[in-house]
Image (tube, rainbow, N blue to C red):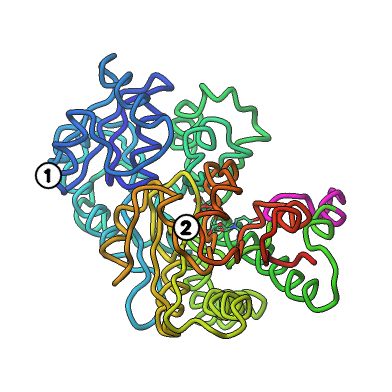
């Protein structure tokens, strides 16, 4: 199959590289010349484990290419994927679809022969209908089908998630498009139960409903963690105890500083808006959004409590600023709320993150250090915001010697409270005695 992938963000680049690895011929297109120039010489615009090697191999073997202009790739394509950004629209929280519709118009002008136009971007219900209208209006003669094929990959585990998904969801009523989509995903050896064919609108909603449910699950365990702190119970054991029930499941029950990232905050908000507009408000998700926002801000208070309210003039060493490990993504990262709040209470912040380059621009007056030990040196308190594996393996005796006072606030529960006590730390974590 010949594939054109419009947009080389997380989803576009990973999907493009993986489809090429499945044996298809893929051209990834992006208006950003610098990005494309970089990709052509093997420079990845994002940090994602395994991506650089996957791209290099498929380029070498002639299945993957990059271009700024969409013409040739779209003209020859069996399937054109739209994988451009759908950020929150300033002011009302709805998804901004201008990039999606611009891509649709461009595809309309270029496509030849029967073409399947696939939305991979997370788009609100009804977007497929609008794309179809745009294309039909510009090219009344064109033979095409607009399909919804949401992507469920997680950053940091993107390639594995794409190649070994729990399911593939395809929203279309068009038989020819169904065949093309089945062929595209054939290398996954999927049987009919794993490719879930639905109507386009249903498929669009599945993506939002999945993200909202997961965001709600995290928020649920975060509130249980607060309760655990109040009544001297252990949230990790509660999570284990409920997660062993198959109806609940053990995943996405890690209490922490609140969810962040490029999807959950934006998609929950967009779903709330869609539901309100449709006259079918989702009160559970509205509450999830509110509770999570409040939580991220409240985490600075947890640090203040650990310091007996004395933050003025104190040095806080922060470990991890990206929204989760194995990514350089800072979008809606809890650190963006926590660190300014600590500074507002008079603390000086020094920090280390293995990949948080972008953070240097986004976080004002933070002294970024070259390694974790430098970031804890002289600190009156160390706050762990992101659970990078290397922090689990720190020499804690060395950390204690370097710190001014051995106070640790671990917002990801990466250490054991009893062990930290023996080592002489004043240790606070989330939802544990
Ligand atoms: C998410 C969805 O998982 C994925 O299916 C979708 O395609 C995109 O959005 P991603 O944002 O990459 O993926 O990361 P994920 O691992 O889901 O984490 C999202 C946020 O939730 C992070 O801030 C993470 O720290 C937090 N989280 C996750 C928790 O606090 N606890 C958990 O148990 C799981």
Residue at 36 percent across and 30 percent down: it is: 17
Residue 333 pos. (x, y %)? 45, 64
Figure quadrant of residue 431: bottom right
Residue at 85 percent across and 76 percent down: it is: 231
**Disc 1/disc 2 C-alpha distance (Å):** 40 Å
Vertical comparison of 311 with 41: above or below:
below
Residue 297 pos. (x, y %)? 52, 79
For numbered disc 2, what is the local secondary structure? helix
- Looking at the rendering, the stretch of residues picked out in magenta corresponds to 241-252
Q: Is residue 89 visible?
A: yes
Categorize mark 2 by other alpha carbons within 10 Å: few (<14), some (14-19), many (20+): many
Residue 76 pos. (x, y %)? 22, 29
Residue at 52 percent across and 42 percent down: it is: 390
Instruction: Identify residue for label 2.
Output: 376
Figure quadrant of residue 215: bottom right
Of 289 and 344, the residue lying toward us: 344
- From the image, which quarter does the N terminus lie in? top left
Query: Residue 100: within the magenta?
Result: no
For numbered disc 1, what is the local secondary structure? helix
Q: Image check: 413 left or right of 174?
A: right
Figure quadrant of residue 259: bottom right
Vertical comparison of 173 with 309: above or below:
above
Q: Is residue 286 visible?
A: no
Residue at 27 percent across and 43 percent down: it is: 45
Instruction: Identify residue for label 1.
Output: 33
- From the image, which quarter does the C terminus lie in? bottom right
């Amino acid at each position: 199959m010949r594939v054109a992938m419009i947009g080389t963000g997380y989803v576009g680049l990973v999907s493009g590289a993986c489809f090429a690895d499945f044996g298809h011929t893929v051209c990834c297109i992006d208006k950003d010349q610098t990005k494309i120039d970089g990709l052509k010489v093997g420079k990845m615009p994002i940090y994602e484990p395994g991506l650089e090697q996957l791209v290099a191999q498929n380029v070498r073997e002639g299945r993957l290419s990059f271009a700024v202009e969409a013409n040739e790739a779209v003209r020859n394509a069996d399937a054109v994927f739209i994988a451009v950004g759908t950020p929150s629209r300033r002011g009302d929280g709805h998804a901004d679809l201008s990039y999606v519709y611009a891509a649709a118009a461009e595809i309309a002008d270029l496509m030849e022969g029967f073409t399947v136009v696939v939305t991979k971007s997370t788009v609100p219900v009804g977007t497929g209908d609008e794309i179809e209208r745009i294309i039909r209006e510009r090219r009344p003669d064109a033979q095409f089908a607009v399909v919804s094929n949401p992507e469920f990959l997680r950053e940091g585990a993107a390639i594995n998630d794409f190649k070994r998904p729990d399911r593939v969801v395809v929203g279309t009523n068009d038989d020819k498009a169904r065949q093309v989509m089945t062929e595209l995903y054939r290398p996954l050896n999927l049987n009919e139960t794993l490719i879930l064919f639905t109507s386009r609108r249903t498929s669009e909603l599945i993506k939002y409903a999945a993200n909202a449910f997961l965001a709600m699950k995290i928020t649920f365990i975060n509130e249980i963690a607060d309760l655990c702190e109040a009544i001297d119970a252990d949230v990790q054991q509660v999570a284990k105890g409920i997660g062993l029930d198959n109806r609940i499941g053990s995943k996405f029950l890690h209490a922490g500083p609140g969810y962040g990232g490029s999807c959950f905050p934006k998609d929950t908000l967009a779903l709330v808006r869609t539901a309100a507009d449709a006259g079918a408000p989702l009160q559970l998700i509205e509450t999830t959004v509110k509770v999570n926002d409040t939580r991220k801000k409240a985490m600075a208070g947890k640090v203040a409590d650990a310091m007996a309210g004395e933050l003025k003039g104190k040095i806080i060493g922060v470990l991890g600023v990206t929204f989760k490990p194995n990514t350089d993504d800072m979008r809606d990262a809890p650190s963006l709320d926590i660190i300014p709040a600590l500074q507002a209470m008079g603390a000086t912040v020094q920090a280390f993150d293995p990949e948080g380059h972008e953070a240097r621009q986004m976080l004002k007056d933070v002294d970024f250090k070259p390694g974790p030990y430098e970031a804890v040196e002289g600190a009156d308190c160390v706050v762990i915001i992101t659970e990078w594996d290397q922090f689990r393996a720190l020499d804690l005796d060395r950390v204690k010697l370097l710190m001014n006072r051995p106070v640790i606030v671990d917002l990801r529960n990466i250490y054991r409270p009893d062990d930290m006590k023996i080592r002489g730390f004043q240790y606070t974590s989330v939802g544990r005695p």
